[in-house]
């Protein structure tokens, strides 16, 4: 259902509030450069610091700006099942094509708890669901057996895998590859994940270089492995630069340096350290972006 270069888009702020004009321009930049789908309110979109009203507004603006040209996969997850259901209901009503559902963080549910959480959302809201496994952020790892159980639910169509464990991802494909689409959740591993059967990436670096990210995925799909590999290795230093500090600090800083947004964050995120800004500037210059 979903494939190619999917951007986990940043949420630009201005004066402490959503900068709607800059946000719409970012979405246009993505669509004009071949991005396959837009994910508002993911981790990269600082969803954890948006209140419910803001969260819904960010999704509304994305859906309006996209205007059905590509799918919108709304980030509506949370560590409260009832809140995730509430956010997902709004996203469906607003016209989202799917929801992105992160594994509940901090409360560290068991594998059965994870299953029941995602099942409850699926039963409450008939909207395609993309699971999101990112143990480095949530302190819980969803195992392949749990993913395979969830893949039996008609609403569960894909998983964004950011565990960093290729063996685990291969096991998901072995157990449920005919029922669920595997998407890379780590730009540094996109090509290896494609090689085991992944179909795309939900990307951070695509915020900055959407065309190259889309071209890499298109080359792979068209069977031009050499071209895909060439673009991947060109992108790799920039992918690494996006994690000089906690995401989304580097990518928002990069977009600010490119004059696309204000370099504004919400606490507890703070501006990038000066030494890392210089490293980031070098990576952007080396790539030809500055």
Image: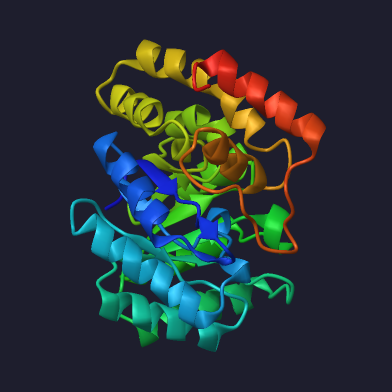
> Is residue 2 at all visible to an observer of this figure?
yes
Above or below: residue 143 compared with residue 152:
above
In terms of depth relative to the viewer, which is nearer, 140 or 178?
A: 140
In the rendered image, residue 207, in percent from the top left (x then y), is placed at 46, 40
Above or below: residue 14 compared with residue 279:
below
Q: Residue at x 60, y 47 (%)?
A: 263
Q: Residue at x 38, y 87 (%)?
A: 124
In terms of depth relative to the viewer, which is nearer, 162 or 243?
A: 243
Above or below: residue 142 compared with residue 192:
below
In terms of depth relative to the viewer, which is nearer, 47 or 6?
A: 47
Q: Which picture quadrant has residue 97?
A: bottom left
In the rendered image, residue 192, in percent from the top left (x then y), is placed at 51, 28
Q: How many marks?
A: 0
278 relative to 13 in the view: left or right: right
- Color encoding of the figure: rainbow
Q: Residue furthest left?
A: 68
Q: Residue at x 48, y 73 (%)?
A: 55
In the rendered image, residue 275, in percent from the top left (x then y), is placed at 81, 30
120 relative to 31 in the view: left or right: right
Q: Residue furthest front?
A: 15
Q: Residue at x 28, y 20 (%)?
A: 223
Above or below: residue 179 compared with residue 118:
above
> Is residue 97 at all visible to an observer of this figure?
no
């Amino acid at each position: 259902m979903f494939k190619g270069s999917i951007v986990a888009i940043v949420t630009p702020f201005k004066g402490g509030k959503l900068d709607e004009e800059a946000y719409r321009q970012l979405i246009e930049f993505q669509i004009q450069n071949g991005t396959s789908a837009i994910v508002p309110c993911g981790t990269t979109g600082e969803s954890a610091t948006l209140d419910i009203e803001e969260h819904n507004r960010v999704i509304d603006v994305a859906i309006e700006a996209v205007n059905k040209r590509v799918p919108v996969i709304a980030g509506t997850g949370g560590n409260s099942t009832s809140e995730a259901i509430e956010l997902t209901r709004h996203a469906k009503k607003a016209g989202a094509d799917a929801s992105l559902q992160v594994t509940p963080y901090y409360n560290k549910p068991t594998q059965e708890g994870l299953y029941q959480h995602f099942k409850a959302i699926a039963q409450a809201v008939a909207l395609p669901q993309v699971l999101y496994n990112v143990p480095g952020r949530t302190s819980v790892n969803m195992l392949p057996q749990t993913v395979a159980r969830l893949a039996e639910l008609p609403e569960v169509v894909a998983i964004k895998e950011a565990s960093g464990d290729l063996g685990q991802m291969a096991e998901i494909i072995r157990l449920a590859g005919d029922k669920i689409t595997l998407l890379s959740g780590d730009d540094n591993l996109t090509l290896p994940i494609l090689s085991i059967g992944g179909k795309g990436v939900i990307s951070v670096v695509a915020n900055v270089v959407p065309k190259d990210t889309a071209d890499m995925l298109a080359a792979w799909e068209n069977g031009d492995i050499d071209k895909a590999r060439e673009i991947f290795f060109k992108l790799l230093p920039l992918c690494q630069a996006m994690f000089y500090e906690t995401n989304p600090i580097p990518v928002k800083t990069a977009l600010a340096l490119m004059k696309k947004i204000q370099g504004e964050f919400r606490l507890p995120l703070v501006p990038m350290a000066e030494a890392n800004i210089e490293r980031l500037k070098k990576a952007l210059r080396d790539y030809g972006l500055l």
